[in-house]
Image: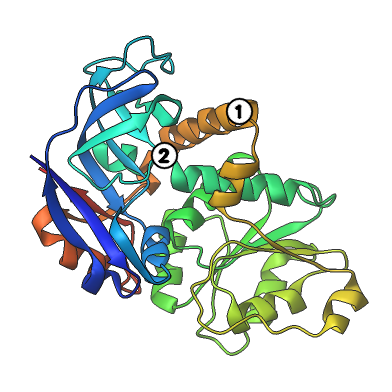
Amino acid sequence: MNRRVVYTRGGSPADVLTIIEEPEPAAPEHGQVLIRTTAFTVHPGDLQTIEAYPGKAAQPVPAGLEATGVVEAIGPGTRAAPGVEVGGRVTVFPQPGAWSQWIVADAEVVVAVPDELSDGVAAQMLANPLTTVMLRREAEEHLAFGYDGCLVQTAAGSSVGRLVTGVSQFHNLALVNVVRSGRGAAELRTRFPDVPVVSTEHPGWADEVRKAADGRPVSVAFDPIGGKLAESLLSLLAPGGKLVSYGLIAEEPISVHASTLLDKSLTLRGKSIGRWLSEASAERRASDVATAKQIALGLKDQFEVAATYGLGELADAVELAVRPGKVGLVLVRPW
């Protein structure tokens, strides 16, 4: 049998996610790869998708987009990516229904996993690194980025935030990190002692960011939160600056008067990994996946696992995945 995580309506993931049993998949067809899943992460983005699902589905909707596992079979005549072979370790993204013991994946989304990477890293090898690549490309469009300009990012202690910090350090890019708590700031300083960190616990945190920028203009800001925090970031930006919004953690909208944008010629831009998937050419996707793999290899210590659960403990895994202050992603072993 194959055990799969599904849902039929939107709502709190802990309430609507269920596990069904179905027959094991048949042999893969042309263009497909059969994978025995060894681990998947409970990604916050997946949970947001489940919570926002409209109406009620006639058939169960398979959950999850990213997982790692071992290739059991490759469909006849299938052209697989380099290193993808029977018995080899792979990661898939985006593959709807990845939260399952068995995955029949499209060959084009199957990526070989380097031997140096554990399952904990491999299970999060693509979505977050690709988000990091997407964000850096967006920042590089600003003329000051990489020269005198400074980057500010919120939720810097998150999985994506740590990768952005590591990549910025590697490329010697000026960065100021912003986190919610003093405890989170202290933890991040231990990881990256050369990168300034500011906590929004302090009423004067915006002035602390300006001081940490050390005279450099804040040219770009990354923010996955939204709401009032995003509004504060707009006030920090230098003329011609850009705010890149890539998440919706806050429930309240971003409220901004047109004059705020007009007076300083600011840009407010939304980016998501979903748009990257739909807009990037095949060549761009292949290049970005190769870069994502290099990020995983170079920053593997930043791919932390907050906790590991079995498939029968899914409710506990979901509860921890959305708990504030956790470090790393939650891993599920489906067998």
> Can you say whether 180 is above or below 220 in the image?
below
Secondary structure of the residue carrying tag 1 is helix
> Within 10 Å of the Cα at label 2, are there few (<14), some (14-19), or many (20+) other Cα atoms?
many
**Which circle's residue, 2 or 1, is located before the other in the chain?**
2
Q: Quadrant of the N terminus?
A: top left
| Lateral position of residue 189 relative to residue 117, left or right | right
Image point (61%, 82%), residue name: 253
Judge whether residue 334 can be spotted in this image. Answer: no
- Residue 84: image quadrant is top left
> Can you say whether 217 is above or below 73 in the image?
below
Q: Position of residue 54 (x, y in %)?
A: 43, 70
Which label belongs to residue 282? 1
Q: Quadrant of the C terminus?
A: top left
> Within 10 Å of the Cα at label 1, are there few (<14), some (14-19), or many (20+) other Cα atoms?
few
Q: CA distance from mark 2 to mark 1?
A: 14 Å
Q: Position of residue 111 (x, y in %)?
A: 40, 27
Three-letter residue code for mark 1: Ala
Image point (77%, 50%), residue name: 145
Which label belongs to residue 93? 2
Q: Position of residue 199 (x, y in %)?
A: 52, 77
Three-letter residue code for mark 2: Phe
Image point (65%, 42%), residue name: 279
* Whether label 2 touches label 1, CB < 8 Å: no
